[in-house]
Image (cartoon, rainbow, N blue to C red):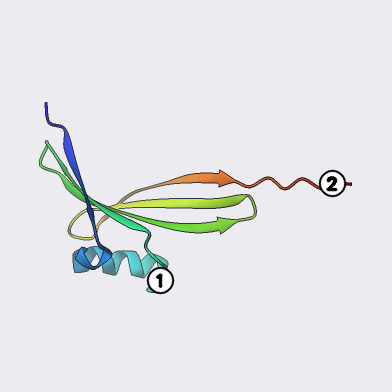
Amino acid sequence: TWVLTVYDIKPSELPEAVLNAFQSAYGATTPIDGVDYIEKSSGEKLYVIEFETFALSGEIDVYLSYSPSGEFLREWVDIYYDYVYDLL
């Protein structure tokens, strides 16, 4: 049974409403690492934007989902810790 299809698209292919919502929240200079367009069997369509940020603990991948009209739906993160050991 088909549940969903994920398409890898270019940031330039984002609907204007989605790009404007992202840039309003994160700035026009925030580099986008990837964009997925998702179609669900329920008929729902959404866009997921991925970008990276850094913190003292390491690299953070941020994922934001938006409706085609630019409504923010959800955020989740993956954190990759960098451990630094002092050799004394």
Say which element carries label 1: loop
Q: Position of residue 60 (x, y in %)?
A: 51, 51
User: Nearer the viewer's eye, disc 1 or disc 2?
Assistant: 2
Which sits in the foreground, 29 or 68? 29
What amino acid is labelled 2 in the image?
A: Leu
Say which element carries label 2: loop
In the rendered structure, find residue 27 and report the number of the disc placed on it: 1
In the rendered structure, find residue 81 and report the number of the disc placed on it: none
Q: Quadrant of residue 49?
A: bottom left
Which sits in the foreground, 9 or 14? 9
Around disc 1, counting alpha carbons within 10 Å, would you say few (fewer than 14), some (14 to 19), or many (20 or more)?
few
Position above or below: 80 against 21: above
N-term mark: 1 or 2 = 1
Which sits in the foreground, 9 or 28? 9
Residue under the image location 20 percent in, 69 percent down: 16
Q: Position of residue 53 (x, y in %)?
A: 50, 58
Position above or below: 56 against 1: below
Around disc 2, counting alpha carbons within 10 Å, would you say few (fewer than 14), some (14 to 19), or many (20 or more)?
few
Residue under the image location 60 percent in, 51 percent down: 58
Q: Where is the N terminus found, in terms of image quarters?
A: top left
Position above or below: 15 against 76: below
Q: Quadrant of residue 34?
A: bottom left
Q: Quadrant of residue 55?
A: bottom right
Q: Which residue is mark 2?
A: 87
